[in-house]
Image (spheres, rainbow, N blue to C red):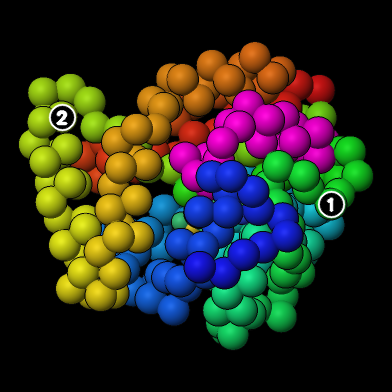
Amino acid sequence: MTSDRLAHGKGAEVHGIFEKIAGYYDRMNFVMTLGRHARWCREVAERVAPPAGGQLLDIATGTGVIALAAARRYPAVTVTGVDFSEEMLTHAKTKPGADAVRWRHAHAGSLPFEDESFDGITEGYLLRNVEDLAGVLREQHRVLKPGGRIVILETCPPSGPVKPVLEWGMRTIVPLLGQVVARDRSSYTYLESSTLAFDSPQQVADVLSGLGFQDIGWSKKFFGTNVILWATKSS
Ligand SMILES: C[S@@+](CC[C@H](N)C(=O)[O-])C[C@H]1O[C@@H](n2cnc3c(N)ncnc32)[C@H](O)[C@@H]1O
């Protein structure tokens, strides 16, 4: 496992996983979401809607799918993508359009930006990987301008009558796909367990509300296993 000066505790474990899976991350995402991940990333970019000439930050940018979708959609916006995995950033930088994004190595818990620097923030699959959810969202609130929007793509613990079936499917299928597609069962066992243990959209919304975000909403995807949440920093 690769170590990182920015990662400690749970972060060090998560960092090691993403350093290891960077090369097959996009392929696995495609298979696990039946090709929907790219579409959700485009929806995240669409919902954040930064003003022309504005600044957009994509946190936990990984291989850059959201940042690149945003840069394509808003050519007049400066898009910055940050991640604490150098391997994931290396893959992002090789993609078509990558020159349009500023890539930075940074930890979501301590963003290297001034207060109120960004008109919008996006992130995909960060929150269930962090130890201090409220602390990470507080840091995003700090760097967001008043009136700025945050849009979050995250996995979602199943609920409702289909919950047992979906839990069984995730426990069985996700690690199996990891083994078959990526020859790495253990990293995808982490994905499944961190998803099932993560907060509901309502719990994330309560944290956002406590931090001073308003106009909070969400839309569940793919049988409720994924969710896009959005909120606005009070002016
Ligand atoms: C599942 S990937 C998501 C990548 C991309 N957002 C997407 O939707 O495809 C999660 C990313 O979060 C990054 N990450 C996890 N915890 C982080 C932290 N505390 N600070 C910065 N990046 C983090 C990982 O390195 C990884 O690239």
Query: How many residues crowd around disc 1 within 10 Å: few (fewer than 14), some, or many (20 or more)?
Result: few
Q: Which numbered tag is attached to residue 79? A: none
Question: Label 2 belongs to which residue?
Answer: 163
Q: Over which residues does the magenta segment extend?
A: 126-145
- Which one is nearer the viewer's eye here, 85 or 221? 85
Q: Quadrant of ligand 1?
A: bottom right
Q: Secondary structure at mark 1?
A: loop
Identify the residue at image location x=20%, y=65%: 177
Q: Residue 168 at what x, y percent from top left?
A: 11, 41
Q: Residue 154 at what x, y percent from top left?
A: 44, 43
The amino acid on which the numbered mark 1 sits, given as a three-letter code, is Pro
- Which one is nearer the viewer's eye here, 214 or 125? 125
Residue 195, by quadrant, is: top left
- Which one is nearer the viewer's eye here, 159 or 78? 159
Identify the residue at image location x=72%, y=38%: 140
Query: How many residues crowd around disc 2 within 10 Å: few (fewer than 14), some, or many (20 or more)?
Result: some
Whether 220 is among the magenta residues is no
Which circle's residue, 2 or 1, is located before the other in the chain? 1
Question: In the displayed structure, would residue 205 be above or below residue 50?
Answer: above
Q: Position of 125 compared to 167: left or right?
A: right
Question: Label 1 belongs to which residue?
Answer: 112
Question: In the displayed structure, would residue 162 be above or below residue 10?
Answer: above
Confirm whether residue 92 shows in the render. no
Identify the residue at image location x=61%, y=23%: 208
The amino acid on which the numbered mark 2 sits, given as a three-letter code, is Lys
Whether 129 is among the magenta residues is yes
Identify the residue at image location x=50%, y=54%: 14
Q: Residue 90 at what x, y percent from top left?
A: 61, 79
Question: In the displayed structure, would residue 88 be above or below residue 214?
Answer: below
Does the magenta stretch mainly form a helix, a strand or a loop? helix
